[in-house]
Image (cartoon, rainbow, N blue to C red):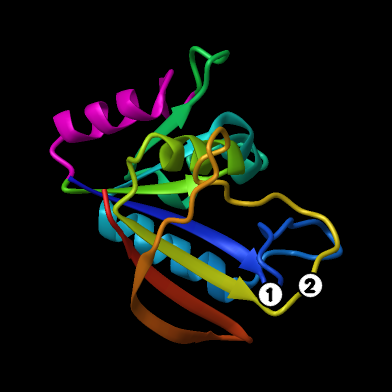
Amino acid sequence: MKTILWATLTANGNYAQSSPENPPKKEALDDFAAQAKAAGNFVVGRRTFEGMRGSGGPGPFADLDIVVVSKHASDIQGATVVRSPKEALSYLQQKGHQTVLISGGADIHNSFLEQGLVDELIFNVTPVVEGKGLNLIADRENYRCQPVQLLDCKPLGGGVVQLRYAMER
């Protein structure tokens, strides 16, 4: 099963922190929707899922398998809750998925990376520089450089550039 980590980054490499003053770019959101629909699923953390739901309801992803990785939540309407990245992958594999989209937050991304569970990276780089932010950390305990292979680079519009990399596992 192929695992794809999808993230929106700022031009200076931080996770893009959306806010009312800095809303997510439409091009990045459209790309996420397309990637999620192609995979038929996505994996997020509890806070990211709650932020996506906004006012509630099934939203545009009602027909997808949504998996929330959380050590504290047990029942979240509209999603399957699991305790670990490996449990998320096992669940989606049992459901017959060939591709898994790992889509957020920083803790979820880093936990999949630390465990060596990512095959591909998709970074949508937005045209903004932020003074603070969260970073991808592939191995927090033992920093190491991990080479990746560029698969594709393309503009999505609105100044957003998508970089796609293969990772060795």
80 to 37, vertically: above or below: above
Q: Amino acid at mark 1?
A: Ala
Report the front residue among 124 and 145: 145
Classify residue 51 by image quadrant. Answer: top right
Q: Amino acid at mark 2?
A: Val
Q: Position of residue 138 (x, y in %)?
A: 50, 46
154 to 75, vertically: above or below: below
Whether residue 78 is visible here, answered yes or no, is: no
Dot 2: element: loop
Report the front residue among 58 and 50: 50
123 to 51, vertically: above or below: below
Query: Which residue matches tag 2?
Result: 129
Q: Which mark is residue 124?
A: none
Q: Which quarter of the image is occupied by the N terminus?
A: top left
Label 2: few (<14), some or many (≥20) within 10 Å? some
Whether residue 104 is visible here, answered yes or no, is: yes
Q: Position of residue 163 (x, y in %)?
A: 45, 75
Q: Mark 1 touching mark 2, by CB under 8 A?
A: yes
Q: Position of residue 123 (x, y in %)?
A: 50, 66
Dot 1: element: loop
Q: Position of residue 84 (x, y in %)?
A: 41, 23
- Magenta extent: 77-97
Query: Which residue matches tag 1?
Result: 11
Side of 48 relative to 122 (left or right):
right
If you read the primary sequence from the N terminus, does the residue marked by circle 1 or circle 2 appear first?
A: 1
115 to 36, vertically: above or below: above
Q: Residue at x 46, y 30 (%)?
A: 68
What is the spatial separation of the Cα atoms under label 1 and label 2, in whole angstroms? 5 Å
Q: Residue at x 55, y 76 (%)?
A: 27
Label 1: few (<14), some or many (≥20) within 10 Å? some
Side of 23 relative to 73 (left or right):
right
